Amino acid sequence: MLSDESRAMGLAFHAAEKADDAYARRYTYVVSADGKIEQAIDTKDPGAQAATLLS
């Protein structure tokens, strides 16, 4: 979970298009052991995302 009031991370990870966007899109990032992003998933159902990834 990330708090990004300035939208700096949202802009860097393309979850927001502009710094003044009301909301950033929700993404789930799967990060490998070496710190590289393996997947970026546009999260449609945050409550079910963990179960979906584990299955």
Image: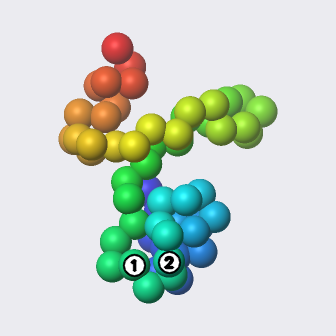
Task: Give the position of the C terminus as an image quadrant.
Answer: top left
Q: Quadrant of the N terminus?
A: bottom left
Position above or below: 32 against 21:
above
The quadrant where residue 14 appears: bottom right
Q: Which residue is mark 1?
A: 21
Query: Which circle marks residue 18 in the picture?
Result: 2
Nearer to us in this view, 17 or 13: 17
Q: CA distance from mark 1 to mark 2?
A: 5 Å
Mark 1 touches mark 2? (CB < 8 Å): yes
Tell me if mark 1 has few (under 14), some (14-19) or many (20+) residues whose alpha carbon lies within 10 angstroms of its own.
few
- Residue 26: where, in percent of width, then height? 37, 54
Label 2 residue SS: loop
Residue farthest right in this picture? 34
Does residue 35 appear to the left or right of 27 in the view shown? right
Identity, as a three-letter code, of the amino acid under mark 2: Lys
Residue 11, how many percent across, how many down?
A: 57, 68
The image shows residue 18, relative to residue 31, as above or below, that is below
* 52 versus 9 height, above or below: above
Q: Residues within 10 Å of mark 2 (few under 14, many from 20)?
A: some
Residue 40 vertical placement versus 52 (above, below) = below
The amino acid sitting under disc 1 is Asp
Mark 1 element type: loop
